[in-house]
Image (cartoon, helix red, strand yellow):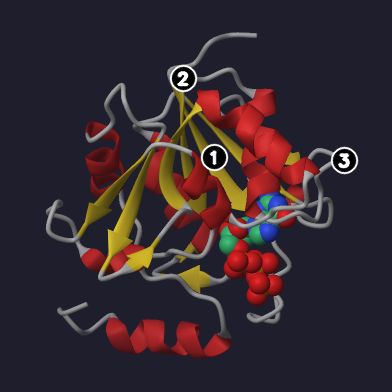
Amino acid sequence: MILHNIVGVLLAGGESRRFGQPKAFAKFKELTFWEHSYDAMKNITDRQLIISHPALVERFRDDSLCQVFTDNEEVKGKGPLAGIYTAMEIENAEWFVVLSCDIPYINEKTIQTLLDLRHQNVKAVIPNIKGKLHPLIGVYHKSILSIISKQLENHEHKMISLLEKIAVLYVSENDIDVDLKSFSNINSQKDYLQLGIDENKTDY
Ligand SMILES: Nc1nc2c(ncn2[C@@H]2O[C@H](COP(=O)(O)OP(=O)(O)OP(=O)(O)O)[C@@H](O)[C@H]2O)c(=O)[nH]1
């Protein structure tokens, strides 16, 4: 297995129940949602993995740098943690940039800012913006794989449970100079409608 320094993980294996259709393929500014996440990390990670589910894999781009996989059989249906586990099993990278596919304002500067804050005593860098944690716009160290694995075995699927077990650097809006819209995520059709309205606003 080749050791990559940083691998980008795009999580797109959710059911999009609230959205009503696969949100990875919703459009914003000419691009699909998944492409916004992909573009935010493609130039600053060595390789990119999309972790989705069988019904969707063919709709993504798959080439030598960006490959599409499905959740490992033993963890499928267990949420974002299953996707992160799958990616960490596939690639032996030092660090993983993890992004959901429902954050169409995400951009490279935001991800690079989080990457720059890594240091040897932390296992994850996670935004805490205006009191809200964003574990799916995060940077994770490979050494947490065994903890994730144990959590999944114990049916503890919450990202927050993982964060409670590892050394996390939480980054607030006061620590970074990035567009805070980056952290807006779209769960429902109502959020999607609001996206067009917010586009013309300058405040978060
Ligand atoms: N690989 C993988 N990704 C997942 C899984 N569940 C959620 N995700 C991804 O994690 C991100 C956040 O997902 P949510 O919005 O919480 O869940 P969702 O299933 O997509 O949507 P809802 O059904 O409305 O809850 C999205 O990018 C999802 O595609 C999973 O089981 N496997």
Q: Marks 3/2: CA distance? A: 24 Å
In the picture, measured across the screen, residue 181 lies left or right of residue 67, that is left
Quadrant of the image occupied by residue 203 = bottom left
Query: Quadrant location of the N terminus?
Result: top right
Q: Are marks 1 and 3 in contact (CB under 8 Å)?
A: no
Relative to 204, does residue 51 appear above or below in the rendering? above
Disc 2 is placed on an element classified as loop
How many residues crowd mark 1 within 10 Å: few (<14), some (14–19), many (20+)? many
Mark nearest the camera among 2 and 1 is 2
Viewer-nearest residue: 86 or 20: 86
Q: Residues within 10 Å of mark 2 (few under 14, many from 20)?
A: some
Question: Disc 3 on helix, strand or loop?
Answer: loop
Q: Quadrant of ligand 1?
A: bottom right
Marks 1 and 3, the one that precedes in the sequence: 1
Looking at the rendered structure, the kind of residue marked 3 is: Glu
Disc 1 from disc 3: Cα separation:
18 Å
Label whose residue precedes the other's in the sequence (2 or 1): 1
Where residue 5 sits: x, y (%)?
43, 18
The quarter of the picture where the C terminus appears is bottom left
Percent coordinates x, y for residue 177 in the rendering: 12, 54
> Is residue 137 placed above or below 105 in the rendered structure?
above
Residue beneath the point at 70% across and 46% down? 82
Residue 73 got which mark? 3
* Amino acid type shown at disc 1: Val
Find disc 2 in the rendering and name its residue. 94
- Mark 3 Cα shell of 10 Å, populated few (<14), some (14-19), many (≥20): few
- In the displayed structure, does residue 198 sit left or right of residue 156? left
Residue at image position (60%, 50%) is 11
Residue 109 in picture, x, y percent from top left: 23, 46
